[in-house]
């Protein structure tokens, strides 16, 4: 694996590693108040990124396009904003960051959907 596929996979692996450490911390401390953010980190950060990694690995024509790089950039930025944004929202410190992260994450998914649909025709 190389290129954009490897980038998506590495983001996913870093995300799930952080998510696992966070889960262990919650278990040890007994404080599960941030579990929704932890869950989003694992789902968006690992599952979605890993699916994208394997998709791009198996669809080299899609991986070579600039849209794949845009997809990665928006997906990573969305993840970076949504996870702490959820923590802030859970602690009643505003929902703006979570909202921006959510919108970026949705945009990334719509790019992925478009990519998959357009490459399915080819």
Image: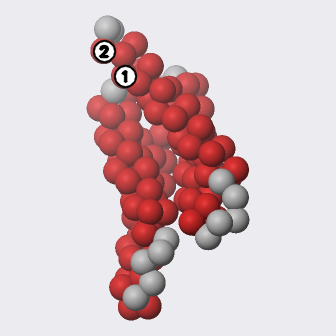
Image quadrant in which you'd find residue 61: top left
Instruction: Reply above or below: 61 against 90.
Output: above
**Which SS class for mark 1?**
helix
**Which SS class for mark 2?**
helix
Residue furthest out toward the front? 92
Q: How far apart in space, not on screen, are marks 2 and 1 (Cα)?
A: 6 Å
Please provide percent x and percent y for residue 108. 52, 34
Image quadrant in which you'd find residue 31: bottom left
Residue furthest out toward the top? 121
Please provide percent x and percent y for residue 30. 40, 88
Residue lying at 30% horizontally and 15% vertically, measured from the top left: 120
Location of the N terminus by quadrant is top left
Instruction: Reply above or below: 54 against 23.
Output: above
Residue lying at 48% horizontally and 27% vertically, measured from the top left: 110
Give whichever of 23, 115 is nearer the camera. 23
Can residue 121 be seen at all in this image of the molecule? yes
Location of the C terminus by quadrant is top left
Whether residue 110 sits left or right of residue 82 in the image: it is left
Can residue 80 be seen at all in this image of the molecule? no
Categorize mark 2 by other alpha carbons within 10 Å: few (<14), some (14-19), many (20+).
few
Categorize mark 1 by other alpha carbons within 10 Å: few (<14), some (14-19), many (20+).
some
Residue lying at 51% horizontally and 30% vertically, measured from the top left: 68
Residue furthest out toward the bottom? 28
Please provide percent x and percent y for residue 25. 43, 84
Q: Which residue is mark 1?
A: 116
Give whichever of 31, 92 is nearer the camera. 92
Residue lying at 38% horizontally and 33% vertically, measured from the top left: 56
Q: Which residue is mark 2?
A: 120
Check whether the beta carbons of the residues at disc 2 and disc 1 lie within 8 A of each other.
yes
């Amino acid at each position: 694996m190389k290129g954009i596929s490897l980038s998506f996979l590495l983001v996913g692996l870093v995300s799930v590693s952080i998510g696992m450490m966070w889960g262990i911390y919650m278990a040890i401390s007994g404080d599960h108040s941030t579990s929704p953010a932890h869950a989003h980190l694992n789902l968006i950060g690992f599952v979605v990124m890993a699916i994208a990694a394997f998709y791009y690995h198996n669809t080299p024509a899609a991986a070579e396009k600039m849209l794949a790089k845009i997809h990665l950039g928006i997906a990573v930025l969305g993840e970076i904003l949504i996870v702490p944004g959820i923590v802030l929202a859970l602690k009643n410190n505003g929902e703006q960051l979570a909202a921006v992260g959510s919108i970026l994450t949705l945009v990334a998914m719509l790019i992925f959907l478009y990519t998959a649909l357009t490459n399915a025709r080819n």
